[in-house]
Amino acid sequence: MQHKPRYRVMRNILYPYNGQEPLSLKQCLRVMLGWVLFFPVCICLLTLPVAVLSSYTLQRAVVVLIFAFLSSAFFFGMLGLLIVTMSNKAARFRQAQKTRVSRYL
């Protein structure tokens, strides 16, 4: 019986690639879009009850939600960029090592 990964759904949403080959531009944009949308939407959904329970006016609640979305989109966008960059560097390093090893065999 094969072992099934524990976090398959989250892994497919946030980073669906194996990391063996560098990501193409389209794949990089998909990962970045996933990070820029998934976490900020979750944070906004968690901020919404706080804004409602704090009895903010509608205008102030909207400003808080927009701020939460934009700040988290920036933060997680930068983290997504870091993940894509480091994954591509690691994949290129692996490919270079395989090339060196296969030259000596």
Image (cartoon, rainbow, N blue to C red):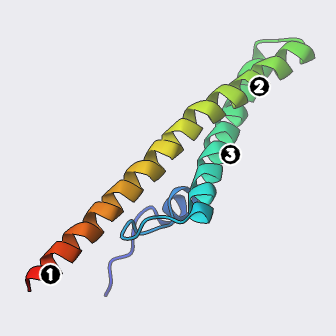
Chain-order first, disc 1 or disc 2? 2
Dot 1 corresponds to which residue?
Answer: 103
Element carrying mark 3: helix
Element carrying mark 2: helix
Q: Going by the picture, which residue comes out furthest to the right? A: 58
Q: Which quadrant of the figure has residue 90? A: bottom left
Viewer-proximal residue among 27 and 4 = 27
**Image location (x, y in percent) of residue 83:** 44, 48
Dot 3 corresponds to which residue?
Answer: 37
Tag 2: amino acid:
Leu
**Image location (x, y in percent) of residue 58:** 91, 17
Q: Residue at x 71, y 29 (%)?
A: 70
- Label 3 neighbour load within 10 Å: few <14, some 14-19, many 20+: some
Q: Residue at x 33, y 77 (%)?
A: 3
Dot 2 corresponds to which residue?
Answer: 65
Chain-order first, disc 1 or disc 3? 3
Tag 3: amino acid:
Leu
Image height check: is 47 above or below 28? above
Horizontal placement of 11 versus 67: left or right? left
Q: Going by the picture, which residue comes out furthest to the front? A: 103
Viewer-proximal residue among 9 and 74 = 74
Q: Which quadrant of the figure has residue 5? A: bottom left
- Label 2 neighbour load within 10 Å: few <14, some 14-19, many 20+: many
Q: Nearer the viewer, mark 3 or mark 2?
A: 3
The N terminus, quarter of image: bottom left
